[in-house]
């Protein structure tokens, strides 16, 4: 039995200042290929028509004949695994590709934890699929998300995790067999920075655009709490059991998400090592005297992130990719992928600038420029528009 990750935290006016009891995250598991799922139901807030993000952590035990559904808002959007080849697949009731399965090139292995993000950007007309901190595929998609069953004799419209409502009338549609953890649903398309952040550490439940968040940490009973502000709890139906095994995350010991207002003296003492990573600007406003006694005992050089520049963008005849200080990018590789998920450009970083002809890349549309380090870890990603 794998123990849950322990997150030590306490809250004082929105800040994590001391340690308290640990919060343990659990996960749900479908133990048989038939009849196991979590029903969230039909709620208007889940009838997303525009930008959409679905994130979940999962581990597949085995493939069964059918759709191997991770999440389904029946008739609107759903994500599963192709039983014939083990590849991720998705469907949306938009203009293109419409309510039909689109199978990706992303192969899912058994007995492996995955952090998945499915992002649909209505404005950019693209679906992006992230797996374990990497953008693994992009595909063209367009149009608002509708309801396929609105004009059908039977109205299927419920949100299910681990299966789909259409199984009632279609015996060949089978549920997911494995572990599912940390499912969250957004009515906005998360950018890559947010995706990577939530893959490292799950949301708090208060984030803007979060319309559903099921942690699966109850461990007992048949109710899965919705930790978002909408509070649409799920019901465990059929052969679903709780598991002590959880998806691996690398959370910082504490995440501060609120403003701290102090009207008197506050003393904070840290008796052990504290690691703080800042990804954006931190501002401190003081109306009186602030004393800070800080001793730095060590520092590490930041990795070479966000070092490339792309111009002109949008591009018509050519595009220049400026790699900056290429001495920091030794053994790095640059890859450009079109909206169909096809690789159209790959080079090792060995010069300050790449001048690339638009004709070399292909047709007009949205492209993704990816920068990989020597271990093929994605360290930067930029959007490129050709017109």
Image (cartoon, rainbow, N blue to C red):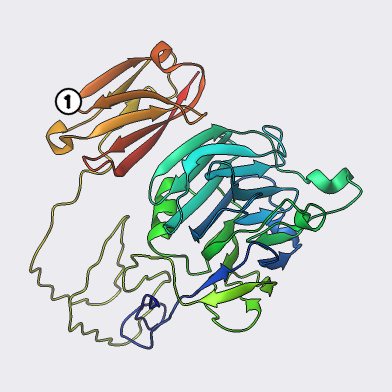
The answer to which of 296 and 155 lies nearer the viewer is 155
Q: Nearer the viewer, residue 302 or 78?
A: 78
15 left or right, relative to 226: left
Residue 267 to residue 62: above or below: below
Residue found 50% across the figure and 35% down from its top:
138
- Horizontal and vertical percent position of residue 308: 27, 33
On screen, residue 17 versus residue 105, left or right, reads left
Position in image of residue 350 (x %, y %): 17, 25
What percent of the width, then of the height, locates residue 214?
Answer: 57, 69
- Whether residue 122 is visible to the viewer of this picture, yes or no, is no
Label 1: how many residues lie within 10 Å, few (<14), some (14-19) or many (20+)?
Answer: some
- Badge 1 element: loop
Q: How many marks?
A: 1
Q: Locate the N terminus and report the quarter of the image it occupies.
A: bottom left
Q: Which quadrant of the figure has residue 8?
A: bottom left
| Residue found farthest to the right | 153
Which residue lies under the disc numbered 1? 350
- Residue 357 horizontal/vertical position (percent): 36, 13
Is residue 96 shown above or below 212?
Answer: above
Q: Quadrant of residue 34?
A: bottom right
User: Residue at point 15% right, 38% down?
Assistant: 328
Q: Residue furthest left?
A: 297
Residue 250 visible in the picture = yes
Residue at horizontal 21 percent and vertical 40 percent from the top: 374
* Left-right relation of 310 to 84: left
- In the image, 284 versus 209, the foreground residue is 209
Q: Quadrant of residue 69?
A: bottom right
Q: Residue at x 65, y 78 (%)?
A: 223
């Amino acid at each position: 039995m794998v123990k849950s990750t322990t997150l030590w935290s306490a809250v004082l006016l929105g800040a994590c200042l001391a340690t308290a009891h640990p919060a343990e995250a659990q996960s749900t598991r479908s133990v048989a290929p038939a009849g196991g799922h979590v029903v969230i139901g039909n709620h208007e807030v889940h009838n997303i028509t525009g930008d959409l993000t679905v994130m979940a952590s999962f581990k597949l035990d085995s493939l069964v004949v059918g759709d191997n559904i991770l999440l389904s808002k029946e008739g609107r959007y759903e994500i599963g695994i192709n039983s014939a080849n083990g590849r991720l697949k998705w469907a949306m009731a938009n203009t293109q590709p419409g309510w039909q399965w689109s199978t990706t090139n992303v192969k899912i292995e058994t007995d492996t934890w995955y952090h998945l993000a499915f992002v649909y950007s209505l404005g950019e007309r693209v679906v992006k699929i992230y797996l374990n901190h990497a953008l693994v595929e992009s595909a063209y998609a367009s149009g608002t998300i509708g309801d396929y069953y609105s004009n059908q004799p039977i109205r299927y419209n419920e949100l299910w995790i681990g299966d789909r409502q259409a199984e009632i009338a279609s015996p060949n549609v089978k549920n997911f067999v494995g572990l599912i953890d940390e499912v969250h649903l957004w009515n906005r398309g998360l950018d890559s920075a947010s995706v990577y952040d939530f893959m490292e550490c799950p949301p708090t439940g208060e984030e803007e655009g979060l319309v559903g968040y099921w942690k699966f940490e109850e461990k007992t009973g048949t109710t899965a709490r919705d930790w978002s502000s909408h509070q649409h709890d799920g019901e465990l139906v059929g052969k679903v059991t709780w598991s002590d095994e959880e998806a691996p995350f690398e959370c910082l010991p504490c995440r501060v998400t609120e403003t701290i207002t102090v009207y008197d003296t506050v003393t904070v003492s840290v008796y052990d090592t504290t690691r703080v990573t800042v990804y954006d600007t931190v501002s401190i406003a003081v109306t009186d005297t602030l004393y800070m006694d800080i001793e730095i005992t060590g520092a590490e050089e930041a990795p070479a992130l966000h070092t490339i520049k792309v111009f002109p963008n949008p591009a018509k005849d050519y595009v220049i990719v400026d790699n900056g200080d290429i001495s920091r990018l030794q053994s790095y590789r640059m890859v450009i992928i079109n909206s169909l998920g096809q690789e159209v450009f790959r080079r090792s970083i060995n010069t300050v600038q790449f001048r690339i002809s638009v004709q070399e890349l292909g047709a007009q549309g949205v492209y993704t420029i990816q920068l990989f380090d020597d271990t093929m870890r994605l360290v930067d990603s930029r959007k490129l528009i050709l017109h």
